[in-house]
Every structure is written in C-alpha cells, then in structure tokens.
Image (cartoon, helix red, strand yellow):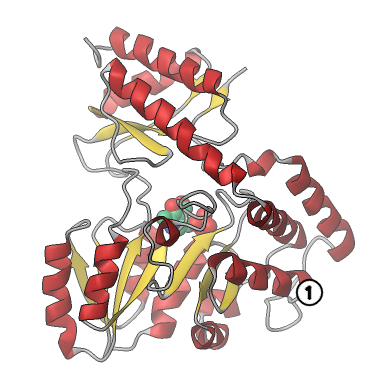
Amino acid sequence: GILNFCANNYLGLSSHPEVIRAAVEALEKFGAGLSSVRFICGTQSIHKDLEEKIARFHQREDAILYASCFDANAGIFEALLTPEDAVLSDELNHASIIDGIRLCKANKYRYKHMDMQDLEAKLRDAQKHRLRLVATDGAFSMDGDIAPLKEICQLAQKYDALVFIDECHATGFLGPNGRGTDELLGVMDKVTIINSTLGKALGGAAGGYTTGPKPLIDLLRQRSRPYLFSNSLPPAVVGCASKALDLLMESNAIAQSMAAKTQRFRSKMTAAGFTISGKDHPICPVMLGDARLAAVMAEDMLNRGIYVIGFSYPVVPKGKARIRVQISAVHSDEDIDRCVEAFTEVGRKHGALP
Ligand code: PLP
C-alpha cells in the first residue's frame, strides 16, 4: 500500500514484464556471469549487441559498457586527458565526475553552477592548454535543473573545447524521443561524449556506459582502468537494459508520458504553497531549508503511505534541506494527487505551510 516517490525508476521499466522476461531469458541462455573482465573471456554477443544498441539510441558512433556509470566516470578523464590538457567542470557535478577528474592529471577548472560568464572566463584562461573538455551533468540530481547545453556548446565551439555530459538523470525520458538533454536542447550533434547509467530509467538493474566517437571508444577499451580491471556485466543485467532500449526505440509513448505527470505534481504542489526547485524535470525537490523539518516530514509522509526521503547536509548545502520527490511514468494521476494531499497535510502539521 506504500507509493514509492524516491526511486530513479523514471519510466517504471524495472518492473516491466518484458524487461523481467528478457533478464530471465538472458540468464538461461548466457549464464549467471562470465568470471572475467571483458578483454579476456568476458565478452558475449549480448554485450556487443547492447553496445551497438546504446550507440544507435544516442545516435553516436560507438559505445563501451562498464559495471556502473560511476566506473564510466572514473575511467574517462584519466584515459583521455594528459597534463597538457584542461578539464572545466560545473561545481555541482556528481561525485563520480569529481572523482574521475581527481584521477586525471589535466589542469582543473571548476566553474560556478551553470554560470556561462564564469565558464567563458575559465575557457579563455584554458586556451593555453592543448585540449579543453567541458564536463557537466545534463540534469542535476539534487536540484532537478538542466544544464544550459546550447550555451555551453556555443562556448565550446568558440573556444575549441569538447563537451562531456553525464546523462544519468536524462537518458530515456528527456527530449521528444527520450534521448536525453542533448535532444531536449537540440544539440545532439554538438555534444562529443555521453556517459550514462543502465541503473535508473533503463531497467534499473546496474551498469553504465560511454558513447561517442569511435576513436574515443577504442581508446577507452585500451586504457580505461575500470573497464580493463573489473568484471563484465552479468547477462541478466544486459538482457534488462537491452529490452528497455528496445521498448524506447519502438515508441516514444513511455518517454512522453512523463512530462504531463511531472507537470501535474509541480503545479499542484506550487499551488499548495510549496517551493519546488528546478523546472520540467521529474526530480522535484520540495525545498524546506531545515534538516530536521525535512526528516520529520519524510517520516510522517511514510505514515501516510508515501515513501520519500529528506536530504540534508552534506548531500546538499547547509540550510537547503529538502525532500526529493521523483515522478515515474508508472505513477497514476491518483497516485500523484495522493502524494500532494499527504504533503499538504504534513506540511501544515509541521509548519512548512501556513
Ligand atoms: N552520475 C550521476 C549524475 C548519478 O546520479 C549517478 C548515480 O547516482 C551516477 C553517475 C552513478 O551511476 P551508477 O549508479 O550507474 O554508478
């Protein structure tokens, strides 16, 4: 009887019968696992097929699988950038991008969150380096805001830089066909590298990938440490993701169904008097400020059958505690209304609403 409003299961595919069946079939046909990394004896036809499908989905030349997107982010910067290069990173990028950048020896610039003036100043300074890479989340998971990719790509063009985006909170549902932030903002041909996860909208099991130009993917197969030194993805996991991509490429109906639901939640909550951060994204952070208020409200929401979690420092800045609600394509309008009603009651009880 409890409704889950805090999963990254944006499209509801983790419980889709066809996705589950595909996992079982892959398990039966290809076994439980490979007991090997990819380049030894850990590559089966399904791994190659999934990489090809990912590249086709994103309209890129090639793709490479990892055990997680954390690994994809840990592996890319060190493999691609040398001490002669520069990486320019949004200050609110995901921890795995930050860790990946820490591992590389390139010159590091951190620009203010989505601040194009600051990015331009840093790009100007970075002209002295051999190669420049701008790295940003496509959609930021704590605030539900979307990177200004059009402007970032324009600056990248002006200052001869490559653009990297992490699409974990965009792949499968942003843009008319769910291709992601680059499709939503009309820059699919301008973003060079995409990292994303199979552990959220695309079936929710596990796994990550990089997709982009073929020479880059070839380089990662030779040099990327999490790819070279970590086990191959289990067949059942590959089966899930592969079916999820099939469903999304057959029709854009699932991806499209998100937008109206997100809009319903955001507008009803705003009308009730709450402040919802971000815009048009199924991550809907209900901003509360006080950490204790966020925790007790989340607890009380669960008593009313709504599963949500309070986020406070150090996950978000001090004084900016919130309850992060995530809308899924499988939520019905009634589910969303039930969630808003519970928030309104709990908010009044704890003084978050008048
Ligand atoms: N990048 C972002 C923006 C994420 O939100 C996450 C997951 O929390 C990751 C990377 C890591 O993805 P995975 O769970 O596949 O390691």
Residue 63 is drawn in which quadrant? Answer: bottom right
The residue at the point 71 percent across, 41 percent down is 16
Is there any visible trace of residue 120 in the rendered image?
A: yes
Up the image or down, 52 lies above or below 319; here it is: below
Mark 1: secondary structure: helix
The residue at the point 27 percent across, 33 percent down is 321
Q: Is residue 268 left or right of residue 23?
A: left
Q: Please tell me which residue lies in front, 80 or 57.
A: 57
Q: Is residue 130 left or right of residue 22?
A: left
Up the image or down, 297 lies above or below 159; here it is: above
Q: Residues within 10 Å of mark 1 (few under 14, many from 20)?
A: few
The amino acid marked with disc number 1 is Ser
* Residue 126 x, y percent position in the rendering: 17, 82
* Residue 277 x, y percent position in the rendering: 28, 37
Q: Is residue 235 left or right of residue 268?
A: right
Beta carbon at label 1 within 8 Å of ligand 1: no
Residue 345 is drawn in which quadrant? Answer: top left
* Residue 179 x, y percent position in the rendering: 51, 58
The residue at the point 43 percent across, 73 percent down is 193
Which residue is disc 1 drawn over?
45
**Residue furthest out toward the right:** 29
Is there any visible trace of residue 300 in the rendered image?
A: no
Q: Please tell me which residue lies in front, 155 or 129.
A: 155
The residue at the point 76 percent across, 62 percent down is 235
* Residue 73 x, y percent position in the rendering: 44, 68
Q: Please tell me which residue lies in front, 141 or 53.
A: 53
In the picture, the quarter occupied by the N terminus is top right
Q: How many marks?
A: 1
Up the image or down, 187 lies above or below 297; here it is: below
Up the image or down, 284 lies above or below 42; here it is: above
